[in-house]
Amino acid sequence: MWLFLRRRLIMWAVLAIAVPLVEWLLGKISQTLRRRKGDSAVTRGLDTAQSGLRSLRGKRR
């Protein structure tokens, strides 16, 4: 039983803490690169990854 509770707690921590943090970090990196170098394949890829994380969280902004 503790194993299942621990697994759910870890999953909750990933979804509640790590995913929003990574989403925010990808946005900041994308903005910084876009300001320095303009729009590129890297910034579009970062935006796509950020969008994927938003859909994982279940929120649309």
Image: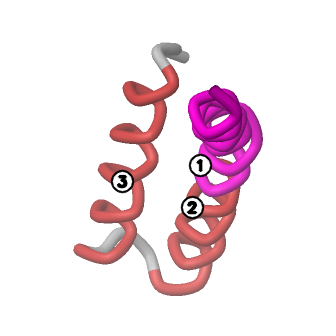
Instruction: Give residue 13's quadrant in the image.
Output: top right
At which x and y percent is residue 4? Answer: 57, 30
Extreme-front residue of the structure: 1
Label 3 – label 1 distance at C-alpha: 8 Å
User: Please, which colouring scheme is shown?
Assistant: secondary structure
* Whether residue 9 is situated above or below residue 27 in the rendered picture: above
Q: Nearer the viewer, residue 54 or 31?
A: 54
* Whether residue 48 is situated above or below residue 26 in the rendered picture: above
Residue at the image point whose x is 46% and y is 15% from the top = 58
Image: magenta residue range: 1-23
Circles 3, 2 touching at the beta carbon (< 8 Å)? yes
Q: Secondary structure at mark 1?
A: helix
Label 3 – label 2 distance at C-alpha: 8 Å
Q: Secondary structure at mark 3?
A: helix
Callout 1: 10 Å neighbours few (<14), some, many (20+)?
some
**In the image, is 33 to the left or to the right of 43?**
right
Label 1 – label 2 distance at C-alpha: 5 Å
Give the residue type at disc 2.
Leu
Q: Which mark is residue 23?
A: 1
Q: Which mark is residue 49?
A: 3
At which x and y percent is residue 48? Answer: 30, 50
Image quarter hosting the N terminus: top right
Residue at the image point whose x is 47% and y is 30% from the top = 54
